[in-house]
Amino acid sequence: MFTEITGAIMIFLLSALLAWPLGKYMVKVFKGEPSWLDFLAPVENAIFRLCGIRPEEGMDWKQNMKALLLVNIAFFLLAFLLLSIQGFIAFWNPNGFGNWEPTLAFNTAASFTTNTNLQHYSGESTASYFTQLAVFTWLQFVSAGTGIAACALLFQGLANETSSRLGNFYKLLIKSCTRVLLPLAAVLALILSFRGTVANFRGIQQAATLEGGAQMVAGGPAAPMIAIKQVGANGGGFFGPNSTHPFENPDYLSNMAENVAILLIPMALVFSFGFYLQRRKLALMFFGLMSLMFISFAGLSAWQEARGNPAFTDMGLAQCTNMEGKEVRFGPVASSLWGVSTTSTSNGSVNSMHDSHTPLSGGIFLLDMLINAIYGGVGVGFINFFVFLVVAVFIAGQMVGRTPSLLGKKLEAREVKIAALIVILHPLLILAGTAIAAHGIRVDPELGWLNDPGFHGFSEMMYEFSSAAANNGSGFEGLGDNTPFWNITTGITMLLGRYLPIIGPLAIAGSLAVKKPVPESAGSLKLESFAFGAVLLSVILIVAALSFFPALALGPIADYFTL
């Protein structure tokens, strides 16, 4: 157990140490300053010319948002088309997989376009190698690039003094892919290949088992997809079991590399905020608040899994670690750390089955997604955190009787209303979807997609909508989710949960960008202070508690008390 704890500490510290220089480098990319990857400029310029993009043309928040939405609509439609006609594309399809059912194609196109990667299918038995690479892996780059570009636009809006120009979304999208995601993914793909992650184009192979029998084993070009799924906070696995599969995550060292990759960019973007706006102390305070929640949740989850089911002790048996649904090569601590990492960053990949964790541990994974601002997804994680920041500044301003201001700009009714609407949106999507699902299964128990009608079954339904709304992608896999109901409802939830929380904060940034700065005075709110940090943390936790405690009480909490 001590060795496992040491490994978990090393993963967190290594992620934080690497995130600091990466955050500084990403600011150079955002601002167009010289960097060691400038040799890629001809490739980027060729893409700009081919697409008719003028990268130096500044755009306001509305123009940038229009560009973001149009590009992502095109990504979605192309993905839906390619999935629907997969069987007609003979290229890289050695197993002869056919076309996808329309609702599954809709759900999967929405999932990968929104950086969610919720998978209602098993890749090794459904998706051709062409689909895995030309659809899924490609979308994992551009969806992550979209989030990073949106975050860069937010930074510029907060940095502007009186200008409405936030930058150019197209330029930021391309450079996020070529200068941030591509080099990191290439390094991780090499590490995983050396550790044993498969990378070939052979079809399903027959292998001899130790018992002398035969087994059909799927391979494929997994390493490149696994690399970008982790680096880009995507989470979609090449194989159905995701990173529990030894072909995706062979050993403890590969597990460490993948876990660091999950945390790296979300952490780095917090530091990027400090470098971009010259507010390093404030960025460190934000990072400290996020890390406090992250470490607390990871420690509680690991303690629960190491403790196991207390019923064994009550029966006079020795305490038994909960190893159900976990890989022996990782153990309970690494599984818990990964679970908190992947749900704190909206990554969604798994190295253990979340459905098999103890109720409180599974509840922690749920809570990470309900908060949706602990590091968060690539780019959009900090954007979600920014919404809580606006609300906290407003509340703190009211407490001291002064007009609230954020980074030298006065917050007025328009900005606060937008932030409040975005805060309300997240629980609305999750709780409304869960209520509809619970009502449906109560009216017609023969629907067949819920195997557990009790508290845990409620948790499974709530987890599915939480994962979709938070653009996470992990799941409690006891739920039969490949049905028209789940494909359509979670597909819509993913689209709303992705783009509305980007539009709102960018509208706030656009509004603040044109306002004249207000000089700081003795009465100004000190964002770097311990008092404001306490207010901000309280806002995050109280909003989550008020929104979700009743639902959590019906699910994982009630499940815990039935052990």
Image: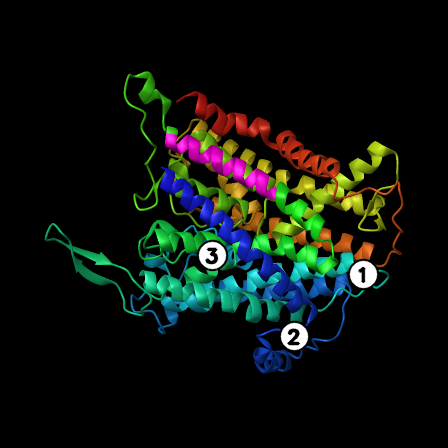
Which image quadrant for residue 85? bottom left
Q: Is residue 370 visible?
A: no
Nearer to me, 307 or 205? 307
Residue drawn at x 32%, y 25% as measured from the top left? 319
Q: Which residues are magenta?
A: 290-306
- Of callouts 1 and 3, the N-terminal one: 1
Q: How is the image coloured?
A: rainbow
Q: CA distance from mark 1 to mark 3?
A: 33 Å
Q: Residue 55 location in percent, x, y?
A: 69, 75
Residue position marked by numbered label 3 in the rendering: 230
Secondary structure found at label 3: helix
Is disc 1 placed on a helix, strand or loop?
Answer: loop
Does any portion of residue 92 appear in the rendered image? yes
Q: Quadrant of residue 445?
A: top left
- The amino acid type, in three-letter code, at marker 2 is Pro
| Disc number placed over residue 525 in the picture, else none | none
List the residue tagged with mark 1. Answer: 160
Instruction: Indicate whether 528 appears above or below 553.
Output: below
* Mark 2 in CB contact with mark 1 (< 8 angstroms): no
Front of the two marks 2 and 3: 2
**Magenta includes 238?**
no
